[in-house]
Amino acid sequence: MKTEYIKTDADNIDLQAIKKAGRIIRSGGLVAFPTETVYGLGGDALNAGSSQKIYEAKGRPSDNPLIVHIAQFDSIYKIASYIPPAAEKLAKMYWPGPLTIILKKTRIVPDETTGNLPTVAVRFPSHPVAQLLIKEAGGYIAAPSANISGRPSPTTGEHVAVDMDGRIDMIIDSGPCRIGLESTIVDFTCDVPMMLRPGYVSQQMLEDVIGTVEKDPAVFGEASEGVKPKAPGMKYRHYAPRGVLTIVSGKKADVINLINDRTAKNSSKVRTAVLCRSENTSCYPQADLVIDMGDDKNEEKIASRLYDSLRKCDEENIDEIYSEEFDTPGLGLAIMNRLIKAAGHNLIRV
Ligand code: TXA
Ligand code: MG
């Protein structure tokens, strides 16, 4: 399949291109598009065949449900059979934005879109290109992140092209995503709302609006082995670069020592990279690649650089990647959730 690649500015949108993209989705095709979190791989959410195509293009297991993206609040009534007042309150506060809510679905949403679950994940993104595309496509776009399953999520059009060229009809490139980590997911089908995936909207920001929010124990490490996460996607290894990623946690000097030890021991055949804070970039002279992730005072920058950094390691054919721990106060939970999964839980405490 030939993939059409279109560039458009978010503040000067190429209307004709988006209209064409909308027609592709309405006729059952797939278009990758920017959102404020990561690039999505979009198909018509109400068309079972489109959802099947999404799973194929991503190489994703079809028991892993898709998020349905809408571009006006009222669209929710057609796909959700019940919206608890707390869900509505939260959505009114953080939509459009990086928040996904899980609700009971109506029959119009195909089982293929929800991985056979009786619930549907709904998100109203704030990116103007996403909003326009959703409207042009008929109001409901199912979109997982536009990466091959298991790889780091794409935060630029180029990332999408690396994974999806030849697999989908069109890619819309509007430059880097502002946030760079996927949306926060909150489930409203349980007694107490439960956060299933951390994101830019923190637990504190949720609780400020609706009171107590629990965290899925299977995701946040408080449960014993074998407990299944409520968001099926959270059980898979994810976000992984091709090289072996190790996170090193501990006092600054100890972390630097251990990483230097590891990068020094390796033969010249093994290419190494380090993901570190700005202040530490000169501390790893032995590594082939040192990536400046920003500093703790600007955790948004760290978040937005994460996936790009992991992909850069792939481009540079890195075999071993060592990362400092980025347990910053607000976004640290989301950053470390992704980093730990990317590392396959490979974490050394020194
Ligand atoms: O920021 C985002 O949310 C991005 C952009 C493109 O909007 N999308 C995204 O989609 O991250 P995806 O498919 O990569 O992740 C969706 C997650 C998966 O872990 C999936 O299992 C979970 O949401 N999910 C979807 N529907 C669900 C449902 N009905 N119940 C529980 N979890 C659900
Ligand atoms: Mg994903």
Image: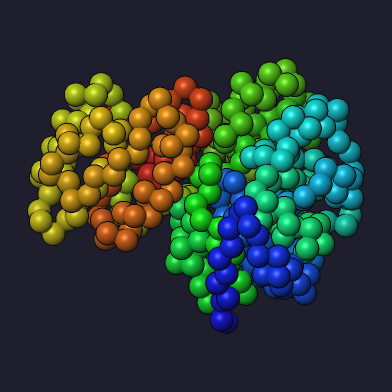
Residue 64: in sight, yes or no?
A: no
Residue 29: in sight, yes or no?
A: yes
Q: Is residue 331 left or right of residue 207?
A: left
Farthest residue, direction front: 12
At x 62%, y 52%, the residue is: 11
Q: Quadrant of the C terminus?
A: top left
Residue 212, placed above or below residue 97: above
Residue 178, placed above or below residue 134: above
At x 53%, y 41%, the residue is: 179
Q: Nearer the viewer, residue 128 or 119?
A: 128
Where does residue 181 sit, x and y in percent of width and height?
52, 43
Q: Nearer the viewer, residue 99 or 245?
A: 99
Farthest residue, direction bottom: 1
Residue 206, placed above or below residue 336: above
Q: Is residue 261 left or right of residue 131?
A: left
Which corner quadrant of the image does residue 143 belong to? bottom right
Where does residue 13 sit, x and y in percent of width and height?
65, 60
Q: Is residue 283 left or right of residue 291?
A: left
At x 35%, y 35%, the residue is: 294
Where does residue 245 sit, x and y in percent of width and height?
32, 46
Where does residue 280 sit, x and y in percent of width and height?
23, 32
Q: Nearer the viewer, residue 14 or 23?
A: 14
Which corner quadrant of the image does residue 341 belong to? top left
Q: Nearer the viewer, residue 169 or 250?
A: 169
At x 57%, y 82%, the residue is: 1
